[in-house]
Amino acid sequence: MSTPRTSTAGAVRTWLCAAVLAALTAALARTFTSGVTLYHLRALHHLYVLDGVLFALAVFLLRRVPPRHTAALVLVGAVAVALTGLLAPPRTSDDAYRYLWDGHVQAAGISPYSYAPTDPALAPLRAADPALFPVGSSCWGWDLHRAGPVCTHLNRPTVHTIYPPVAEVWFLGLYEAGRLTGGHGVRTAQVGGAALAVATSVALLLVLRRNRLPLHRAALWAWCPGVAIWAVNDAHVDTLGVLLAVCGLAAAAHPRRTAAGVLLGAAVATKLIPVLVLPGALAGVLRRRPSWRDALVPVVAGLTFLLCYLPYVLASGPAVLGYLPGYLKEEGYDQGTRFGLLNLLGLPQQYLPVLVAAVLLAAVLLVLRNGDPARPWRGALTVTGTALFLAAPGYPWYGLLVVGLVALDGDWEWLALPAAAEVMIVLGRELQQQAYAGALCVVLAGAALRALARTADLGAALSAPAVPQPAPWPAPQPAPVPAATAPAPSPIRTGSFR
């Protein structure tokens, strides 16, 4: 039973955490309403730093909040942080415009993989969508692009879409929701992103509670400034993949292999990056004798992935690959020119993809051999984080999956990984190596500190004096038999038996 003094202390800690959370919300609101756009983000670096400091302080204070208040505070903060992303149009990405266009194309009964947005076959749809294809002589703005006579908010308007099928279903839903509710343009996508961000916070709380893990970890996602920026304001579909991956890993932990396979397959069919969490769902499988049940997760995930693609393959054939090959070439991954950290080794560029594959395979085998099947998100974080460090992408929203896995596992130092990509967005892509090298140092330092803490705990446990045990009570002795009632001794017989 808590005393009045402890109750007062708990209330003070709760209100202090809430005050810092309110300050974080105000700082994020100022960040989004500053009017700064993608190509002038250097003016925002001080606000980003303030957002990060307040986020770290709020999460630290949440650890001291009484457990009965933690879940409610996390959810209130999740809603408040998500709402800040709705205060302005997208500031750092124009991908959401492509989402709405793909939804419009599907609503017209056309596969989004069949035509590029500027294809003459889609001219009637472009004319019917002035919000995405503004008409007039002026085509100026950070999120406007000219492709011949066409002016559009869509980036890469001359190439086919790149997004997998579950993402395309989400885009169709966004378009229909906007049409039915009278929503205007990209705001519909942002509201959808806010709904996904809050739903992921709820899912994290449920998974943490079921696995008897600290609920305050969910705030690492729910209150993260990056979630407000990338998931809500920019409305990236990666958030849907994170939600499905979190639910899939939760199913794998218990284990519900079929459900895990369906959810993880759908996550991969949303954004290909969640394929990296599959080894986590099979953590430790090489440490025991594998059974046919272990194959359910990858087999069901693969079948789900293929079934999601099937309707679009029937409609568009090989065009479902979209711009993916061109994107990999554009980003330089086919020749190894974008592997920032590995370039520090001075190896020939053509060898870097092979080295990437070898390192990633080693990480997968490590998880399959030594991973904890009761904590599949730990192995998923190891493989996903390794892959992103190797690829060193310049898009921080690729790290949304890392943020979700960090919220499950609690290793906060991995948040430096998406932060490195945000540094590239704000200060310039030429800082790729410095940003990711700094993030790697943070992750290694965090791992070293955790190892030292575990060693210190073990040493303290081994050096602790033995607790004296109370002497056992003497065993009860049987009562002596009275002589008067003792049986007479049997007479001794001699001779042979008859």
Image (tube, helix red, strand yellow):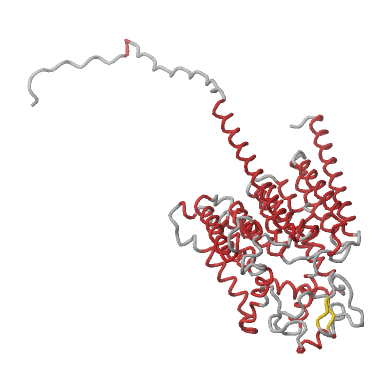
Residues 37 and 193: in front is 37
Q: Is residue 465 left or right of residue 245?
A: left
Residue at the spot x=64%, y=61% of the render?
Answer: 339
User: Which residue is most to the top?
Assistant: 483
Q: Position of residue 311 (x, y in %)?
A: 63, 80
Residue at the spot x=63%, y=48% of the render?
Answer: 211
Q: Position of residue 344 (x, y in %)?
A: 63, 55
Residues 10 and 328: in front is 328
What is the quadrant of residue 58 in the picture? top right
Q: Is residue 216 left or right of residue 253?
A: right
- Position of residue 224 relative to residue 69, above or below, is below
Q: Position of residue 29 (x, y in %)?
A: 88, 56
What is the quadrant of residue 228 in the picture? bottom right
Residue at the spot x=76%, y=38% of the render?
Answer: 64
- Position of residue 153 relative to residue 124, above or below, is above
- Position of residue 306 relative to residue 124, above or below, is above
Query: Which image quadrant: the N terminus?
Result: top right
Q: Position of residue 373 (x, y in %)?
A: 54, 52
Label total for image? 0
